[in-house]
Amino acid sequence: MLAQPKDLPALDRLLNHPLLAPLSQAHGRSLLTQEARALLDELRAQALQGSLQKAALEEGALCEALRQRVEAKLAPRMRAVINLTGTVLHTNLGRALLADEALQHVLAMMAGPNNLEFDLSSGGRGDRDSMVEDLLCEITGAEAATVVNNNAAAVLLSIAALGGGKEVIVSRGELVEIGGAFRMPDVMAAAGARLVEVGTTNRTHAADYERAIGPNTAMLMKVHTSNYRVQGFTSAVDEGTLAPIAHAKGLPLVTDLGSGSLVDLAQWGLPREPLPQEMLAAGCDVVTFSGDKLLGGPQAGLIVGSKAMIQRIRKFPMKRALRMSKLPLAALEATLRLYLQPERLTRDLPTLRMLTRPLAEIQAQAARLQAPLVQALSPRFTVNPSEMLGQIGSGSLPVESLPSAGLVIAPAGIAKKGVGTALDALASALRGLPLPVIGRVQQDQLWLDLRCLDERQEAQLLAQLPALKEALA
Protein backbone atom coordinates (compact mmCIF):
# COMPACT_ATOMS: atom_id res chain seq x y z
CA MET A 1 0.00 0.00 0.00
CA LEU A 2 1.30 3.43 -0.94
CA ALA A 3 1.81 6.18 1.63
CA GLN A 4 0.77 9.82 1.35
CA PRO A 5 2.80 12.83 2.54
CA LYS A 6 0.36 13.27 5.44
CA ASP A 7 1.32 9.80 6.71
CA LEU A 8 4.87 10.91 7.57
CA PRO A 9 5.52 11.48 11.30
CA ALA A 10 6.45 14.88 12.65
CA LEU A 11 10.17 15.47 13.16
CA ASP A 12 9.87 15.75 16.96
CA ARG A 13 7.82 12.59 17.19
CA LEU A 14 10.48 10.64 15.28
CA LEU A 15 13.38 12.10 17.29
CA ASN A 16 11.71 11.27 20.60
CA HIS A 17 11.08 7.65 19.75
CA PRO A 18 12.49 5.34 22.49
CA LEU A 19 14.36 3.25 19.91
CA LEU A 20 16.45 6.31 19.04
CA ALA A 21 17.51 7.13 22.60
CA PRO A 22 20.79 5.14 22.40
CA LEU A 23 21.60 6.76 19.04
CA SER A 24 20.98 10.25 20.43
CA GLN A 25 23.10 9.54 23.49
CA ALA A 26 25.96 8.16 21.39
CA HIS A 27 26.10 10.86 18.73
CA GLY A 28 24.25 13.91 20.04
CA ARG A 29 20.96 15.57 19.16
CA SER A 30 22.32 17.85 16.41
CA LEU A 31 23.49 15.13 14.04
CA LEU A 32 20.41 13.04 14.70
CA THR A 33 18.12 15.99 13.92
CA GLN A 34 19.99 16.83 10.73
CA GLU A 35 19.77 13.27 9.39
CA ALA A 36 16.14 12.81 10.52
CA ARG A 37 15.11 15.95 8.67
CA ALA A 38 16.95 14.77 5.53
CA LEU A 39 15.35 11.33 5.78
CA LEU A 40 11.85 12.77 6.09
CA ASP A 41 12.47 15.09 3.15
CA GLU A 42 13.49 12.14 0.97
CA LEU A 43 10.47 10.10 2.05
CA ARG A 44 8.15 13.05 1.41
CA ALA A 45 9.53 13.39 -2.12
CA GLN A 46 8.88 9.67 -2.73
CA ALA A 47 5.34 10.01 -1.39
CA LEU A 48 4.63 12.91 -3.74
CA GLN A 49 5.90 10.77 -6.64
CA GLY A 50 3.61 7.94 -5.56
CA SER A 51 6.46 5.50 -4.92
CA LEU A 52 6.57 5.31 -1.10
CA GLN A 53 5.34 2.13 0.55
CA LYS A 54 3.60 2.45 3.92
CA ALA A 55 5.87 -0.26 5.29
CA ALA A 56 8.76 2.23 5.09
CA LEU A 57 6.97 4.43 7.63
CA GLU A 58 6.63 1.83 10.32
CA GLU A 59 8.33 2.97 13.51
CA GLY A 60 10.95 0.23 13.49
CA ALA A 61 11.75 0.80 9.81
CA LEU A 62 12.09 4.57 10.25
CA CYS A 63 14.39 4.21 13.25
CA GLU A 64 16.54 1.66 11.43
CA ALA A 65 16.77 3.88 8.35
CA LEU A 66 17.85 6.80 10.51
CA ARG A 67 20.45 4.68 12.28
CA GLN A 68 21.93 3.63 8.96
CA ARG A 69 22.08 7.25 7.77
CA VAL A 70 23.91 8.38 10.91
CA GLU A 71 26.40 5.52 10.72
CA ALA A 72 27.02 6.18 7.02
CA LYS A 73 27.64 9.88 7.72
CA LEU A 74 30.18 9.02 10.43
CA ALA A 75 31.90 6.19 8.55
CA PRO A 76 35.51 6.99 7.58
CA ARG A 77 36.14 7.78 3.93
CA MET A 78 39.76 6.62 4.07
CA ARG A 79 39.73 2.89 4.77
CA ALA A 80 42.24 0.10 5.03
CA VAL A 81 42.16 -2.38 2.13
CA ILE A 82 43.84 -5.66 1.25
CA ASN A 83 46.18 -5.07 -1.67
CA LEU A 84 46.20 -8.12 -3.93
CA THR A 85 46.97 -6.20 -7.13
CA GLY A 86 50.56 -7.40 -7.33
CA THR A 87 51.88 -3.83 -7.15
CA VAL A 88 53.76 -3.33 -3.89
CA LEU A 89 54.06 0.47 -4.02
CA HIS A 90 50.60 1.17 -5.43
CA THR A 91 50.00 4.89 -5.97
CA ASN A 92 46.22 4.56 -5.61
CA LEU A 93 46.48 2.38 -2.50
CA GLY A 94 48.73 4.64 -0.44
CA ARG A 95 52.18 3.50 -1.58
CA ALA A 96 54.57 2.51 1.23
CA LEU A 97 53.30 1.01 4.48
CA LEU A 98 54.84 2.50 7.62
CA ALA A 99 57.01 0.37 9.85
CA ASP A 100 55.79 -0.43 13.37
CA GLU A 101 58.48 1.86 14.79
CA ALA A 102 57.19 4.74 12.68
CA LEU A 103 53.59 4.13 13.70
CA GLN A 104 54.50 4.02 17.39
CA HIS A 105 56.58 7.19 17.12
CA VAL A 106 53.78 9.05 15.31
CA LEU A 107 51.29 8.03 17.99
CA ALA A 108 53.61 9.12 20.78
CA MET A 109 54.37 12.50 19.16
CA MET A 110 50.77 13.28 18.20
CA ALA A 111 49.34 12.42 21.63
CA GLY A 112 50.99 15.37 23.35
CA PRO A 113 53.27 18.39 22.91
CA ASN A 114 56.66 17.78 21.31
CA ASN A 115 59.83 19.67 20.46
CA LEU A 116 58.97 20.21 16.80
CA GLU A 117 60.57 23.66 16.76
CA PHE A 118 62.06 23.82 20.24
CA ASP A 119 65.74 23.26 21.03
CA LEU A 120 65.89 21.21 24.23
CA SER A 121 69.57 22.00 24.72
CA SER A 122 69.38 25.80 24.57
CA GLY A 123 65.75 26.27 25.52
CA GLY A 124 65.26 28.47 22.45
CA ARG A 125 63.52 28.17 19.11
CA GLY A 126 64.51 25.15 17.06
CA ASP A 127 64.32 24.10 13.40
CA ARG A 128 62.02 21.25 12.39
CA ASP A 129 64.51 20.11 9.74
CA SER A 130 66.89 19.23 12.57
CA MET A 131 64.69 16.22 13.40
CA VAL A 132 65.93 14.42 10.31
CA GLU A 133 68.88 16.38 8.90
CA ASP A 134 71.59 14.56 10.86
CA LEU A 135 70.08 11.20 9.93
CA LEU A 136 69.93 12.07 6.24
CA CYS A 137 73.49 13.37 6.28
CA GLU A 138 74.80 10.26 8.01
CA ILE A 139 72.98 7.90 5.64
CA THR A 140 73.77 9.73 2.38
CA GLY A 141 77.04 11.48 3.19
CA ALA A 142 75.54 14.89 2.40
CA GLU A 143 76.77 18.09 4.06
CA ALA A 144 73.21 19.28 4.69
CA ALA A 145 69.60 18.30 4.12
CA THR A 146 66.08 19.68 4.19
CA VAL A 147 62.63 18.14 3.66
CA VAL A 148 59.29 19.17 2.17
CA ASN A 149 55.89 17.55 1.77
CA ASN A 150 56.60 15.47 -1.37
CA ASN A 151 59.19 15.02 -4.09
CA ALA A 152 57.29 17.16 -6.58
CA ALA A 153 57.64 19.97 -4.05
CA ALA A 154 61.33 19.16 -3.60
CA VAL A 155 61.94 19.52 -7.34
CA LEU A 156 59.84 22.69 -7.59
CA LEU A 157 61.55 24.31 -4.61
CA SER A 158 65.07 23.41 -5.75
CA ILE A 159 64.49 24.85 -9.22
CA ALA A 160 62.83 28.00 -7.86
CA ALA A 161 65.55 28.62 -5.27
CA LEU A 162 68.54 27.91 -7.51
CA GLY A 163 67.26 28.63 -11.02
CA GLY A 164 64.34 31.04 -10.73
CA GLY A 165 64.49 33.82 -13.30
CA LYS A 166 67.27 32.11 -15.24
CA GLU A 167 67.91 29.12 -17.49
CA VAL A 168 68.02 25.48 -16.40
CA ILE A 169 69.55 22.95 -18.78
CA VAL A 170 67.98 19.47 -19.05
CA SER A 171 68.33 16.65 -21.56
CA ARG A 172 65.31 16.15 -23.86
CA GLY A 173 65.31 12.48 -22.91
CA GLU A 174 64.67 13.41 -19.27
CA LEU A 175 61.64 15.69 -19.61
CA VAL A 176 59.49 13.28 -17.67
CA GLU A 177 55.83 13.32 -16.77
CA ILE A 178 54.74 11.58 -13.58
CA GLY A 179 51.27 11.00 -12.12
CA GLY A 180 48.74 13.80 -12.27
CA ALA A 181 50.26 15.39 -15.39
CA PHE A 182 53.26 16.65 -13.38
CA ARG A 183 55.55 17.54 -16.29
CA MET A 184 59.09 18.81 -15.99
CA PRO A 185 58.56 21.69 -18.47
CA ASP A 186 55.52 22.82 -16.49
CA VAL A 187 57.45 22.59 -13.22
CA MET A 188 60.19 24.76 -14.71
CA ALA A 189 57.64 27.38 -15.70
CA ALA A 190 55.93 27.28 -12.30
CA ALA A 191 59.30 27.72 -10.60
CA GLY A 192 60.05 30.79 -12.72
CA ALA A 193 62.90 29.18 -14.63
CA ARG A 194 63.38 28.93 -18.40
CA LEU A 195 63.88 25.41 -19.64
CA VAL A 196 66.74 24.84 -22.06
CA GLU A 197 66.52 21.44 -23.75
CA VAL A 198 69.67 19.76 -25.02
CA GLY A 199 70.34 16.64 -27.07
CA THR A 200 67.63 14.47 -28.56
CA THR A 201 65.04 12.12 -27.09
CA ASN A 202 67.38 9.12 -27.27
CA ARG A 203 70.91 10.59 -27.27
CA THR A 204 72.50 13.45 -25.34
CA HIS A 205 76.24 14.14 -25.12
CA ALA A 206 78.48 16.17 -22.82
CA ALA A 207 79.10 18.64 -25.63
CA ASP A 208 75.38 19.38 -25.81
CA TYR A 209 75.46 20.69 -22.24
CA GLU A 210 78.68 22.63 -22.78
CA ARG A 211 77.33 24.41 -25.86
CA ALA A 212 74.07 25.33 -24.08
CA ILE A 213 75.71 27.04 -21.09
CA GLY A 214 75.46 30.81 -21.37
CA PRO A 215 75.46 33.97 -19.24
CA ASN A 216 71.88 33.33 -18.06
CA THR A 217 72.39 29.69 -17.11
CA ALA A 218 71.61 29.03 -13.44
CA MET A 219 72.06 25.27 -13.14
CA LEU A 220 72.33 21.95 -14.89
CA MET A 221 69.78 19.29 -14.06
CA LYS A 222 69.53 15.52 -14.38
CA VAL A 223 66.23 13.63 -14.01
CA HIS A 224 66.22 9.89 -13.38
CA THR A 225 63.70 8.25 -15.70
CA SER A 226 62.47 5.74 -13.14
CA ASN A 227 58.96 5.42 -14.63
CA TYR A 228 59.94 4.58 -18.20
CA ARG A 229 62.92 3.31 -20.21
CA VAL A 230 64.43 4.36 -23.53
CA GLN A 231 66.16 1.42 -25.18
CA GLY A 232 68.21 0.83 -28.31
CA PHE A 233 70.44 3.52 -29.84
CA THR A 234 70.78 5.68 -26.73
CA SER A 235 73.32 7.80 -24.94
CA ALA A 236 73.18 9.89 -21.76
CA VAL A 237 75.67 11.85 -19.71
CA ASP A 238 76.12 10.56 -16.18
CA GLU A 239 76.46 12.76 -13.12
CA GLY A 240 80.18 12.04 -12.75
CA THR A 241 80.81 13.45 -16.22
CA LEU A 242 78.37 16.33 -15.93
CA ALA A 243 79.50 17.63 -12.52
CA PRO A 244 82.93 18.93 -13.70
CA ILE A 245 81.23 20.66 -16.65
CA ALA A 246 78.84 22.46 -14.29
CA HIS A 247 81.47 23.32 -11.70
CA ALA A 248 83.90 24.66 -14.29
CA LYS A 249 81.28 27.33 -15.04
CA GLY A 250 80.45 27.90 -11.38
CA LEU A 251 77.05 26.21 -11.73
CA PRO A 252 75.35 23.68 -9.45
CA LEU A 253 74.32 20.25 -10.69
CA VAL A 254 70.92 19.10 -9.42
CA THR A 255 69.60 15.58 -9.92
CA ASP A 256 66.13 14.22 -9.21
CA LEU A 257 66.06 10.50 -8.41
CA GLY A 258 62.29 10.24 -8.03
CA SER A 259 61.78 6.98 -6.14
CA GLY A 260 64.99 7.37 -4.18
CA SER A 261 66.27 4.14 -2.66
CA LEU A 262 68.77 4.48 0.20
CA VAL A 263 70.13 0.93 -0.13
CA ASP A 264 71.28 -1.13 -3.09
CA LEU A 265 68.28 -3.26 -4.03
CA ALA A 266 70.45 -5.54 -6.15
CA GLN A 267 71.70 -7.32 -3.02
CA TRP A 268 68.24 -8.92 -2.82
CA GLY A 269 67.98 -9.66 -6.52
CA LEU A 270 65.84 -6.59 -7.22
CA PRO A 271 66.43 -4.02 -9.99
CA ARG A 272 69.15 -1.59 -9.05
CA GLU A 273 68.29 2.07 -8.56
CA PRO A 274 70.79 4.94 -8.30
CA LEU A 275 71.45 6.01 -4.71
CA PRO A 276 71.66 9.57 -3.34
CA GLN A 277 75.01 8.55 -1.83
CA GLU A 278 76.37 7.78 -5.31
CA MET A 279 75.03 11.00 -6.82
CA LEU A 280 76.66 13.10 -4.13
CA ALA A 281 79.95 11.22 -4.50
CA ALA A 282 79.76 11.85 -8.26
CA GLY A 283 79.68 15.60 -7.63
CA CYS A 284 76.00 16.53 -7.54
CA ASP A 285 75.31 19.61 -5.46
CA VAL A 286 71.65 18.78 -4.79
CA VAL A 287 69.79 15.47 -4.92
CA THR A 288 66.02 15.17 -4.53
CA PHE A 289 64.02 11.98 -3.91
CA SER A 290 60.78 10.65 -2.46
CA GLY A 291 60.06 9.36 1.04
CA ASP A 292 57.05 7.08 0.42
CA LYS A 293 58.29 4.92 -2.42
CA LEU A 294 61.40 2.76 -2.27
CA LEU A 295 62.55 4.48 0.92
CA GLY A 296 59.47 3.00 2.61
CA GLY A 297 58.39 5.98 4.70
CA PRO A 298 55.68 8.68 4.65
CA GLN A 299 55.00 11.05 1.80
CA ALA A 300 57.93 13.44 1.79
CA GLY A 301 60.38 15.19 -0.52
CA LEU A 302 63.98 14.85 0.63
CA ILE A 303 66.66 17.29 -0.50
CA VAL A 304 70.32 16.56 0.29
CA GLY A 305 73.49 18.21 -0.91
CA SER A 306 76.14 20.82 -0.23
CA LYS A 307 75.72 23.14 2.71
CA ALA A 308 75.70 26.23 0.48
CA MET A 309 72.99 24.95 -1.87
CA ILE A 310 70.77 23.54 0.88
CA GLN A 311 71.03 26.83 2.75
CA ARG A 312 69.78 28.71 -0.32
CA ILE A 313 66.89 26.27 -0.71
CA ARG A 314 65.99 26.40 2.96
CA LYS A 315 65.90 30.21 2.99
CA PHE A 316 63.76 30.50 -0.14
CA PRO A 317 60.28 31.89 0.79
CA MET A 318 58.47 28.98 -0.88
CA LYS A 319 60.01 26.57 1.62
CA ARG A 320 57.58 27.50 4.40
CA ALA A 321 54.58 26.76 2.19
CA LEU A 322 55.95 23.32 1.37
CA ARG A 323 57.31 22.29 4.75
CA MET A 324 56.37 19.01 6.40
CA SER A 325 53.97 18.88 9.31
CA LYS A 326 54.75 17.12 12.57
CA LEU A 327 52.90 13.90 11.72
CA PRO A 328 54.84 12.83 8.58
CA LEU A 329 58.03 14.30 10.03
CA ALA A 330 57.79 11.97 13.02
CA ALA A 331 57.16 9.02 10.69
CA LEU A 332 60.11 10.00 8.50
CA GLU A 333 62.47 10.29 11.47
CA ALA A 334 61.54 6.83 12.73
CA THR A 335 61.86 5.35 9.23
CA LEU A 336 65.31 6.86 8.69
CA ARG A 337 66.48 5.47 12.03
CA LEU A 338 65.81 1.98 10.65
CA TYR A 339 68.50 2.58 8.02
CA LEU A 340 71.12 2.83 10.77
CA GLN A 341 70.63 -0.95 11.17
CA PRO A 342 70.73 -2.13 7.52
CA GLU A 343 70.83 -5.85 8.37
CA ARG A 344 67.33 -5.54 9.86
CA LEU A 345 65.69 -3.64 6.99
CA THR A 346 64.05 -6.62 5.28
CA ARG A 347 62.49 -7.52 8.60
CA ASP A 348 61.50 -4.11 9.97
CA LEU A 349 60.66 -2.09 6.83
CA PRO A 350 57.38 -3.30 5.25
CA THR A 351 58.33 -2.21 1.73
CA LEU A 352 61.54 -4.22 1.69
CA ARG A 353 59.90 -7.08 3.56
CA MET A 354 57.27 -7.42 0.84
CA LEU A 355 59.71 -6.89 -2.03
CA THR A 356 62.05 -9.59 -0.72
CA ARG A 357 59.40 -12.07 0.37
CA PRO A 358 60.45 -15.59 -0.77
CA LEU A 359 58.46 -16.93 -3.70
CA ALA A 360 58.07 -20.32 -2.00
CA GLU A 361 56.34 -18.63 0.95
CA ILE A 362 53.85 -16.90 -1.35
CA GLN A 363 53.17 -20.14 -3.22
CA ALA A 364 52.48 -21.94 0.06
CA GLN A 365 50.03 -19.21 1.01
CA ALA A 366 48.21 -19.61 -2.31
CA ALA A 367 47.88 -23.34 -1.68
CA ARG A 368 46.47 -22.63 1.80
CA LEU A 369 43.86 -20.19 0.55
CA GLN A 370 42.64 -22.14 -2.46
CA ALA A 371 40.21 -24.44 -0.63
CA PRO A 372 38.53 -21.71 1.48
CA LEU A 373 38.04 -19.57 -1.61
CA VAL A 374 36.66 -22.51 -3.58
CA GLN A 375 34.13 -23.06 -0.80
CA ALA A 376 33.10 -19.39 -0.89
CA LEU A 377 32.93 -19.02 -4.67
CA SER A 378 31.84 -22.36 -6.12
CA PRO A 379 30.03 -23.29 -8.27
CA ARG A 380 30.00 -19.87 -9.97
CA PHE A 381 33.79 -19.52 -10.10
CA THR A 382 36.86 -21.70 -10.30
CA VAL A 383 39.90 -20.93 -8.15
CA ASN A 384 43.40 -22.09 -9.09
CA PRO A 385 46.89 -21.25 -7.80
CA SER A 386 49.20 -19.72 -10.36
CA GLU A 387 52.58 -18.08 -10.77
CA MET A 388 52.32 -14.36 -11.47
CA LEU A 389 54.37 -11.31 -12.34
CA GLY A 390 53.76 -8.23 -10.20
CA GLN A 391 55.30 -4.79 -10.06
CA ILE A 392 57.47 -2.97 -7.58
CA GLY A 393 55.48 0.22 -8.09
CA SER A 394 52.88 1.81 -10.32
CA GLY A 395 55.08 4.93 -10.57
CA SER A 396 58.30 3.47 -9.16
CA LEU A 397 59.97 0.99 -11.52
CA PRO A 398 56.66 0.21 -13.27
CA VAL A 399 58.40 -1.67 -16.10
CA GLU A 400 60.19 -4.05 -13.74
CA SER A 401 58.38 -7.35 -13.13
CA LEU A 402 58.41 -9.14 -9.79
CA PRO A 403 57.97 -12.94 -9.72
CA SER A 404 55.06 -13.78 -7.45
CA ALA A 405 52.18 -16.20 -6.94
CA GLY A 406 48.49 -16.09 -6.17
CA LEU A 407 45.06 -17.30 -7.12
CA VAL A 408 43.33 -17.00 -10.49
CA ILE A 409 39.52 -16.86 -10.34
CA ALA A 410 37.46 -17.48 -13.46
CA PRO A 411 33.69 -17.62 -14.07
CA ALA A 412 32.44 -21.17 -14.56
CA GLY A 413 29.76 -22.47 -16.90
CA ILE A 414 28.81 -19.21 -18.60
CA ALA A 415 29.09 -17.93 -22.14
CA LYS A 416 32.02 -15.78 -23.18
CA LYS A 417 29.88 -12.64 -23.39
CA GLY A 418 28.88 -13.00 -19.73
CA VAL A 419 32.42 -13.29 -18.35
CA GLY A 420 32.94 -9.55 -17.96
CA THR A 421 29.70 -9.10 -16.07
CA ALA A 422 30.51 -11.99 -13.73
CA LEU A 423 33.99 -10.66 -13.00
CA ASP A 424 32.65 -7.16 -12.37
CA ALA A 425 30.19 -8.60 -9.86
CA LEU A 426 32.96 -10.53 -8.09
CA ALA A 427 35.34 -7.55 -8.00
CA SER A 428 32.51 -5.36 -6.68
CA ALA A 429 31.65 -7.89 -3.96
CA LEU A 430 35.30 -8.03 -2.89
CA ARG A 431 35.48 -4.24 -2.73
CA GLY A 432 32.25 -4.18 -0.73
CA LEU A 433 33.60 -6.31 2.11
CA PRO A 434 34.18 -4.63 5.51
CA LEU A 435 37.90 -4.79 4.70
CA PRO A 436 37.85 -4.29 0.91
CA VAL A 437 39.92 -6.68 -1.21
CA ILE A 438 41.50 -5.24 -4.37
CA GLY A 439 42.78 -7.55 -7.12
CA ARG A 440 43.31 -7.08 -10.84
CA VAL A 441 41.30 -8.27 -13.83
CA GLN A 442 43.23 -9.61 -16.79
CA GLN A 443 42.77 -12.32 -19.43
CA ASP A 444 39.08 -12.69 -18.50
CA GLN A 445 40.05 -13.67 -14.94
CA LEU A 446 40.41 -12.04 -11.55
CA TRP A 447 43.97 -12.37 -10.29
CA LEU A 448 44.73 -12.16 -6.57
CA ASP A 449 48.49 -11.68 -6.18
CA LEU A 450 49.44 -12.60 -2.61
CA ARG A 451 52.86 -10.95 -2.31
CA CYS A 452 51.51 -8.18 -0.05
CA LEU A 453 49.24 -10.41 2.06
CA ASP A 454 50.77 -10.79 5.53
CA GLU A 455 49.60 -13.22 8.22
CA ARG A 456 47.29 -10.69 9.87
CA GLN A 457 45.50 -9.79 6.64
CA GLU A 458 45.34 -13.45 5.61
CA ALA A 459 43.31 -14.13 8.75
CA GLN A 460 41.11 -11.11 7.99
CA LEU A 461 40.53 -12.31 4.45
CA LEU A 462 39.51 -15.77 5.64
CA ALA A 463 37.13 -14.27 8.20
CA GLN A 464 35.32 -12.35 5.44
CA LEU A 465 34.74 -15.28 3.08
CA PRO A 466 31.27 -16.13 4.51
CA ALA A 467 30.22 -12.52 3.84
CA LEU A 468 31.61 -12.80 0.31
CA LYS A 469 29.64 -15.99 -0.30
CA GLU A 470 26.48 -14.30 0.93
CA ALA A 471 27.05 -11.23 -1.24
CA LEU A 472 27.35 -13.40 -4.34
CA ALA A 473 24.37 -15.64 -3.51
Image: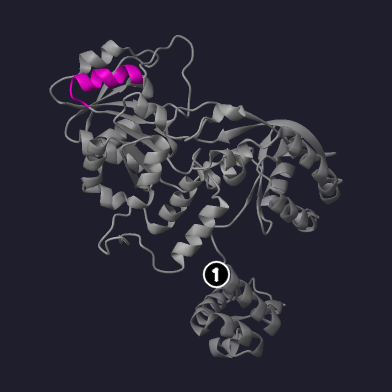
Q: List the single residue furthest toward the left.
A: 215
Above or below: residue 367 compared with residue 10: above
Q: What residue is disc 1 on?
A: 74
- Left or right: residue 167 versus residue 78 is left
Answer whether residue 288 is magenta in the image: no
Q: Amino acid at mark 1?
A: Leu
Question: Quadrant location of the C terminus?
Answer: bottom right
Q: Magenta residues, as a range?
A: 240-251
- Left or right: residue 94 versus residue 115 is right
Residue appearing at x 55%, y 70% in the figure: 74
Q: Position of residue 340 (x, y in %)?
A: 49, 42
Residue appearing at x 40%, y 32% in the figure: 276
In this view of the protein, can residue 471 be seen by the observer? Answer: no
Q: Position of residue 144 (x, y in %)?
A: 30, 40
Residue appearing at x 27%, y 64% in the figure: 123
Above or below: residue 8 compared with residue 329: below
Question: Quadrant location of the N terminus?
Answer: bottom right
Q: Position of residue 287 (x, y in %)?
A: 35, 33
Q: Position of residue 436 (x, y in %)?
A: 65, 53
Asked whether 463 or 348 is in front, the reply is: 348
How packed is label 1: few (under 14 Cα within 10 Å), some, or many (20 or more)? few
Count of numbered badges drawn on the protein: 1
Secondary structure of the residue carrying tag 1 is helix
Q: Quadrant of residue 371?
A: top right
